[in-house]
């Protein structure tokens, strides 16, 4: 395989990253096995960009990068299988403990259950965090978080460590400790690429340099030869239909050729790893539950569901006037369905992708041997699992309230409409907000846009519903059916009526869930349009766009 046969773990070939106002490159250099390479340059010179190109987190505008002999964009999982990455100023998940975070990264790099605990313990000892393994990361100092960032990079263990400013925030004793740790890693057969803007720091640890200034590579070679002019070399790739046995020897004899290698072509197929999807889904579920605003909204929804049911079940049917029971039913069934479930969906999914970019954790997770499909599916399924639990609980309480209000027979008539309308709106807004969060990559803006879409749909539905009731214009009614809130757009009119008729038949005739009940096939079609199209757009954009660095 090209690169690996040459003993080179990283190769840049005329690589350029164009940001419009600034250009990094062209970069042409390689890193051999067993090296400790210092990537040196002032702040903003392009060191972090070079690292992110190397890891396949961003796409080069021109040229290519090879990692472990593979294209890290086309073969992300295989290329990063033995690579550990610690970003600059890592901002790890505050709700987890160091041991939990290392277990997460250990599962993502493929460690089995038997080895996982053992390596977590060893790695925490290596970086000096054993005493803090059960502390919340949010309670740790910046220096300890930096130690943990290096620790997660060493899970696997990797054969290549890529460290972006690893000594930031580390005390002098810790710096000495890490130098010893890194030297031991290389003596065991590893390779290290370490960026820094301090020459003395690189000089103490590294055996070679790659100096980048204003986006250009100005030196690549041994530290001792820093004052000498670096010889520029170019790799020439020739594709031949036949390859005579003696051709390689002849090429090596050409003046100016320092090395020639035969490269075999083949196919590499990467399959979806369900275990990694499941690990990321559980992580996303933990992360979502740890967000207080989501948890508060879930609790509020359950309370709104439960209180009317409590009154209906404990007060006795005779103590509640017949005309008042549908009001309680509307509060307990329609109110969560019309507002709370959609907002739960919005808050869960709008921050699913965008908050990871803001915190800088997306690039840590995607620097593991995890494909973008696995990351995408894990994030989506984790949040959707929580939403599903809430929807199921809401449906159960809705059926219970309906049974107490209208009796079991009429309750069964209401059940399909209630469940379908809940699933419809929740799924649509979950997928739409998930897409918005990925496109804008800022959680606050994603919440605002997703909420605006919801309220616009609600208001438009109310207006169209009122026009239909006043004029009988079927066109207005058809427009209402295409809105994502169509199952519940009639609720405000329903509640505002001066006298609410009793009985399930009258309630259904008011149209609160009439649109969905009238055509299940039409509803499924709308779900396909809103939900599936949103997911396709999200996946296409996520697969094409660069993985955003931490947004400040």
Image: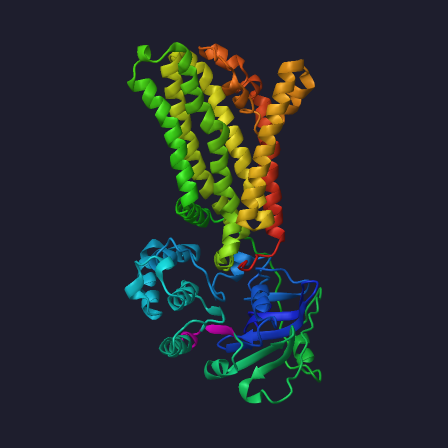
Magenta part of the chain: 185-195
The residue at 32%/66% (across/down) is: 129
292 over 137 or under it: above or below: above
297 over 185 or under it: above or below: above
The residue at 67%/16% (across/down) is: 474
Let me know if residue 187 is in the magenta part.
yes
On-image quarter of the N terminus: bottom right
Instruction: Work out whether residue 500 can be spotted.
Output: yes
The spot of residue 94 in percent (x, y) is: 40, 56
| Residue 268 placement: quadrant | bottom right
| Residue 264 placement: quadrant | bottom right
267 over 274 or under it: above or below: below
Let me know if residue 532 is in the magenta part.
no
The spot of residue 43 in percent (x, y) is: 57, 73
On-image quarter of the C terminus: bottom right
Q: Is residue 195 left or right of residue 261?
A: left
137 over 303 or under it: above or below: below
The spot of residue 540 in percent (x, y) is: 62, 47
| Residue 175 placement: quadrant | bottom left
């Amino acid at each position: 395989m090209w690169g690996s046969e040459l003993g080179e773990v990283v190769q840049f070939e005329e690589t350029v990253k164009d940001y419009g106002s600034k250009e990094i490159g062209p970069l042409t250099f390689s890193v051999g096995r067993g090296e400790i390479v210092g990537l040196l340059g002032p702040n903003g010179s392009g060191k972090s960009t070079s690292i992110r190109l190397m890891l396949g987190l961003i796409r080069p505008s021109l040229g290519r990068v090879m990692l472990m002999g593979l294209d890290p964009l086309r073969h992300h999982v295989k290329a990063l299988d033995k690579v550990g990455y610690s970003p600059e100023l890592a901002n790890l998940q505050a709700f987890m403990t160091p041991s939990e975070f290392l277990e997460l990264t250990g599962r993502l790099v493929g460690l089995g259950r038997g080895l996982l605990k053992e390596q977590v313990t060893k790695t925490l000892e290596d970086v000096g965090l054993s005493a803090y393994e059960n502390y919340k990361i949010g309670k740790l100092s910046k220096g300890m978080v930096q130690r943990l960032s290096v620790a997660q990079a060493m899970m696997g263990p990797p054969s290549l460590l890529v460290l972006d400013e690893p000594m930031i925030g580390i005390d002098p004793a810790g710096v000495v400790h890490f130098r010893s740790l890194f030297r031991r890693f290389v003596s065991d057969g590893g390779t290290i690429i370490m960026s820094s803007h301090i020459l003395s720091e690189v000089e103490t640890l590294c055996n070679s340099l790659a100096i980048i200034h204003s986006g250009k590579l100005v030196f690549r070679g041994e530290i001792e030869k820093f004052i000498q002019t670096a010889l520029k070399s170019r790799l020439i790739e020739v594709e031949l239909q036949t390859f005579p046995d003696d051709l390689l020897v002849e090429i090596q004899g050409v003046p100016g050729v320092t090395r020639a290698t035969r490269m075999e072509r083949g196919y590499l197929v990467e399959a979806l790893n369900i275990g990694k999807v499941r690990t990321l889904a559980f992580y996303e579920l933990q992360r979502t539950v740890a967000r207080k605003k989501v948890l508060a909204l879930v609790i509020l929804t359950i309370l709104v569901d439960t209180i009317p049911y409590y009154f209906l079940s404990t007060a006795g049917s005779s103590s509640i006037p017949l005309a008042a029971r549908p009001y309680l039913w509307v509060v307990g069934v329609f109110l969560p369905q019309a507002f709370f479930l959609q907002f739960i969906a919005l808050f869960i999914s709008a921050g699913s992708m965008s908050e990871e970019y803001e915190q800088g954790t997306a690039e840590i997770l995607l620097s593991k041997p995890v494909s973008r499909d696995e990351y995408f599916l894990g994030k989506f399924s984790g949040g959707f699992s929580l939403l599903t639990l809430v929807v199921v609980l809401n449906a159960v309480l809705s059926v219970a309230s309906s049974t107490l209000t209208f009796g079991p027979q009429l309750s069964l008539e209401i059940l399909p409409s209630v469940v379908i309308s809940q699933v419809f709106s929740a799924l649509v807004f979950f997928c739409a907000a998930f897409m918005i969060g990925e496109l804008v990559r800022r959680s606050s803006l994603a919440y605002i846009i997703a909420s605006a879409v919801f309220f616009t749909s609600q208001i438009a539905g109310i207006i169209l519903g009122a026009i239909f009731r006043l004029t009988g214009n079927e066109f207005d009614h058809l427009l209402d059916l295409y809105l994502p809130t169509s199952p519940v757009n009639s609720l405000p009119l329903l509640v505002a009526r001066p006298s609410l008729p009793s009985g399930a038949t009258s309630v259904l005739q008011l149209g609160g869930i009439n649109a969905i009940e009238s055509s299940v096939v039409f509803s499924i079609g709308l779900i396909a349009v809103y939900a599936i199209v949103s997911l396709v757009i999200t996946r296409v954009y996520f697969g094409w766009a660069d993985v955003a660095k931490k947004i400040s």
